[in-house]
Amino acid sequence: MRWRNSSTHYGLTSIALHWLVAVAVFGLFALGFWMVGLNYYSSWYRTAPDLHKSIGIVLFLIMLLRMLWRFISPAPGPLASQGRLTQRAAKLGHGLLYLGLFVVMISGYLISTADGRPIGVFGLFDVPALITSIPDQADRAGLVHEYVAWALVIFAVVHALAALKHHFIDRDATLRRMLGFNAD
C-alpha cells in the first residue's frame, strides 16, 4: 500500500488519519459525557478534564495535519457508479464533519481558557489563553461545545451508516477504499 493517495485509492496516511480522528472523536465524546457527571470528591475530577483537553489539543494538531495532507495528496475521485447527487452529498457531509470538528475544538479551547489560564498538554507544553474577553465566554462556548459535539457524533454515525449502505446495498468500493483494501 502506498503512503499517498492515488486517483483511485486512499493511501495509508489518509486512512490512518481518518481512523485516528474517528477513534479520538468517539473517545473524547465518551470521556466528556462521563466526566460531566463527576463530583468534586471523585479521584478523576481534575484528571479527566485535563486528559480531555490534552487529547483535544492533539486532535486539533492532527486535524491541521489532515487538512494539509489533503492539499499534498488529494482524495481519490468519486467512483464511476456514484451519481452527481451522491457526490455532492459526500462533499457536503465531509465539509460538515470538518466544520463540526473545528467548532467543537475551538469552543473547547474557549471554555478552557476563559479564565486566562493556559491549557497544559500532557505536561509537555502549554497552549496560551489568547481570547478571554468574550462576555460569559465559558458558558457560551460550553453550550456550543455540548450541542455541536452531540451533532458531530450523530452525524459521524450517519456517515458510518452511509459507508455501510454503500458497501452492503450499493455494493461499491467506498468503504473498501477507506479500509485500505483494493477497490477493484
Image (spheres, rainbow, N blue to C red):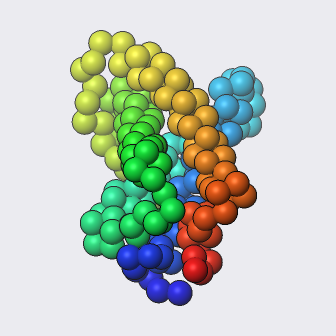
User: What x and y, as percent, mark residue 1?
Assistant: 53, 87
Q: Residue furthest top?
A: 135
Q: Residue at x 54, y 30 (%)?
A: 151
Residue placed furthest toward the bottom:
1
Which residue is drawn at the image coordinates 47% and 73% (left, top)?
10
Q: Name which quarter of the figure residue 85 lies in.
A: top left
Picture residue at 40% right of the left edge, 70% below the top? 76
Vertical position of residue 113 compared to residue 134: above or below: below
Using the image, determine if residue 13 lies above or below residue 154.
Answer: below
Q: Which of these two is toward me, 74 or 113?
A: 74
State the residue in front, 169 or 7: 169
- Drawn side of residue 42 relative to residue 156, left or right: right
Is residue 55 among the parts visible in the rendering?
yes
Residue drawn at 48 percent across, 19 percent down:
143
User: Between 121 and 22, which is closer to the camera in this rendering?
Assistant: 22
Q: Is residue 128 left or right of residue 151?
A: left
Above/below status of 149 relative to 84: above
User: Which of the image's four quarters has the C terminus?
Assistant: bottom right
